[in-house]
Image: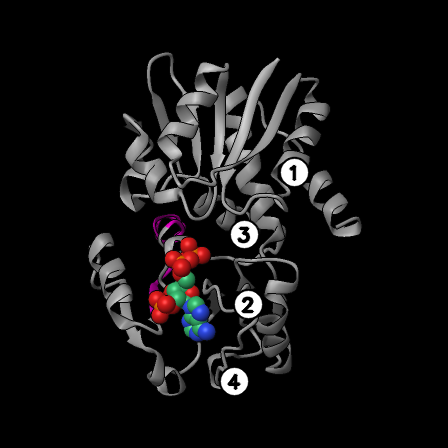
Amino acid sequence: SNQLAVFGHPIAHSKSPRIHQAFGHQLGIDLRYQAIDVVDGNLAAAALRFQQMGGSGANVTLPFKQDAYKLCRSLSANATRTQVVNTLHWRGDHWFGDNTDGPGLVRDISERHRQDLRARRVLILGAGGAVQGILSALLDAGVDTITLANRSPAKADALCDLIGEPARVKSLYWQDLADAGHFDLVLNGTSAGVQGASLSLPFSLLTPRTLAYDLSYGPAATDFLAWAKAGQCWLAVDGLGMLVEQAALAFALWFGQTPDSEAVYQNLRTTP
Ligand code: ATR
């Protein structure tokens, strides 16, 4: 059978095995998908062992997406530009790397939540690996500008430099958020929620048309989404849809067939 895996640390609570088993079941594709905890931090060694055991495709999650990029001898355009990889595909003698996080986010926003991204003003909170992976796809989707606000401004500046479109991707000091006006899309890409910390954001970022989106899901997204709802935005959603869509795009890369992501999304919503 097809051998697949997700690499991360920690990885025990990953929903990826469940999602990909469901996709395989839908399409009658026999697969084994395991969660591999890279406890020693050595992704390259873990990926080599996996491949030698017959592994042909893998997802990579935190904190190894930059390491996965370095592992690949060929890359998609999106992975080349963002320099982070969340999907590996064995191509006979080397790993090919793709990044489906950004395209998955765009699909979730534009198709599931029906928000047109073209000409939108986007604010992104945070400038870590999770944010790095989505910038290129948002630009390709036609957003007007992306403003990056990070607690440590140097990291936001570094991401702006990486993308190299100064007219469209700019950084903003965190303490200037209250004077920044409002945005059509406010994305939380910080790990504050995971760490149980609160962001204390100004309501002036929101309008009744704003989509507020947290890249994380479950309890980690609760605080940000509560703030957004209290600020009376149009819609406040977590990143569960993005998780399912990035998985569907990875699955399509591995098998050349597109699964029904909506059925799996609904199942995860009703039975978390
Ligand atoms: P990930 O790979 O999930 O993006 P990361 O690279 O550690 O993880 O990045 C975490 C992001 O959340 C960073 O942008 C971090 O800000 P700093 O660069 O200033 O550390 C941000 N973050 C974490 N906790 C935060 C908090 N309490 N308030 C604001 N930003 C926070």
Please state which of the two labelled residues, at mark 2 or mark 3, is closer to the viewer.
Answer: 2
Please state which of the two labelled residues, at mark 2 or mark 4, is closer to the viewer.
Answer: 2
Residue 261 badge: 1
Q: From mark 1 to mark 4, how far is it between C-alphas? A: 33 Å
Q: From mark 2 to mark 3, how far is it between C-alphas? A: 25 Å
Q: Which residue is found at the position 28% from the left and 38% from the top? A: 80
Relative height, residue 98 to residue 207 (above, below):
above
Residue under label 4, please give it.
203
Count the marks. Answer: 4
Residue 31 badge: none
List x then y, in percent, for residue 172.
Answer: 30, 75
Instruction: Indicate the quadrant where residue 171 lies.
Output: bottom left
Q: Amino acid at mark 1?
A: Ser
List x then y, in percent, for residue 118.
Answer: 42, 57
**Would you say the residues marked 2 and 3 are in contact, meaning their CB atoms lie under 8 Å apart?**
no
Q: Which residue is found at the position 50% from the left and 50% from the top? A: 105
* Residue 107 within the magenta-colored segment of the rendering: no
Residue under label 2, please give it.
193
Q: From mark 4 to mark 3, how far is it between C-alphas? A: 24 Å
